[in-house]
Amino acid sequence: HIEYDVLHKAATRLMRHGAEMNQRAEYFVCFGTAGLYCRQWAIAGEAIYGDQGFLSLFDDGFSEDGNGLEGGNYHRATVMSMCRFAEQLHDQGVSLYTPRFKRVFDASVMTTPRGVAEYCQASYEQAYRIYRNPDYLPTLRQLRKSFNAQSVLDGVPGIPDGPEALSATSVLDASGYLFLRRNTPAGHRCLAINFGMQWDRTELDRLHTRFFVDGKRIDRQIGRITYGSPFAGNMYRSFAHNLVTVDGMDMTEQRVPIAGQHGADTLTAALFMTREDAPLYPGVRQWRLVAIAGEHFIVLDHLESATPRQYAWHYYAESKAQQVSLPLEAMVTSPAMAARREVNGSVGPCRRGMTDKALVAS
């Protein structure tokens, strides 16, 4: 009776849900597993082929290059459920490892600093067995440093030796993510910037940069502890990121095209330029150059407008040891952004400085 009075009825209700993205994935895992267990093949099939099922998410939940539409930061929430469900079905002789699912695995490594998946690592054993993408090998090398049952059961024996990190630049054009990478004598370097989609859902963060040394991030941004915090909304606003704001405003959600890229032995770089008909800030043209030169990160900004504007360059340091050439003074209260003042203390300790000249941060 438990099967039919509890699991079957609950699965039927879940099958008719209206949730989206990562919640949709959790739902079809639940009712699909219940359908298999209760031998209710219509419910199990709905979990795969239905308009709220596994395959539907490739159209509704991911970009064409396989990244979750909620943003790179929430990509994992959907992928973890999909991997779990695909592994369950594979054990029953049903393969969900389609070419479109491969894109999801690809994006999950390409949007990390070292090209090593940060979640679902064990799922790459099955993915590599099926897709044989060599970009998965750094993830498998990391995974196999310690015992893992999935490596024993699903892994391809004798994977080739090779680097433990990707050194090539990754461009996910459909998502609008760029990851510059370089191996240097001082270690691995990665500079990430998003020029199309947000990195986390609803963030106004185009051209936001993140720096990584040997896979560890060396800068920060304003984040969120809980959804219910009165400060939770700070993370969505433009000033919460490593970018330039204009007149204290939040930017628009526009894609910023790549104007050019360069790769050489000692320098890898990309230039972004806003479109005149689709600016981030009305009446402002903006260029941002990002580069890894030797072992150093470089970010150069140039903004133009027909009328005087106030530009604010925001950068959140990971350590007090990081320095900027501009003299800074502590702010007693949280900054006022446009007509809105943030709740005091909600952005943490702030320092500011004013200049009409170039500045250097190190």
Image (spheres, rainbow, N blue to C red):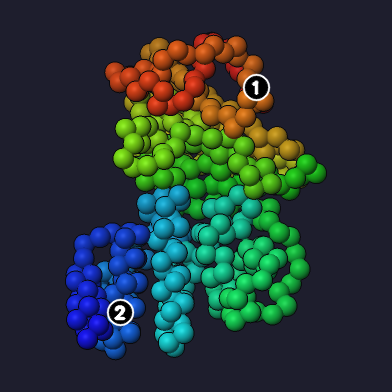
**Residue situated in front as seen by the camera: 150 or 314:** 150
The amino acid at mark 2 is: Ala
Sequence-earlier tag: 1 or 2: 2
Horizontal side of residue 198 vs 111, given as left or right:
left
| Relative vertical location of residue 63 with respect to residue 232 in this rendering, above or below | below
Q: Residue at x 25, y 78 (%)?
A: 7
Horizontal side of residue 31 vs 124, given as left or right:
left
The x and y percentages for residue 324 are: 63, 20
Q: Residue furthest front?
A: 1
Q: Residue at x 53, y 70 (%)?
A: 123
Q: Residue furthest right?
A: 185
**Residue situated in front as seen by the camera: 277 or 256:** 256
Q: Residues within 10 Å of mark 1 (few under 14, many from 20)?
A: few
Residue 34, numbered label: 2
**Residue situated in front as seen by the camera: 28 or 66:** 28
Horizontal side of residue 113 vs 31, given as left or right:
right
Q: Quadrant of residue 289?
A: top right
| Relative vertical location of residue 315 with respect to residue 326 in this rendering, above or below | below
The x and y percentages for residue 91 are: 46, 85
The x and y percentages for residue 60 are: 31, 61
Q: Quadrant of residue 360?
A: top right
- Looking at the rendered image, the quarter that the C terminus falls into is top right
Q: Is residue 231 visible?
A: yes
Residue 323, numbered label: 1
Q: Residue at x 68, y 53 (%)?
A: 167
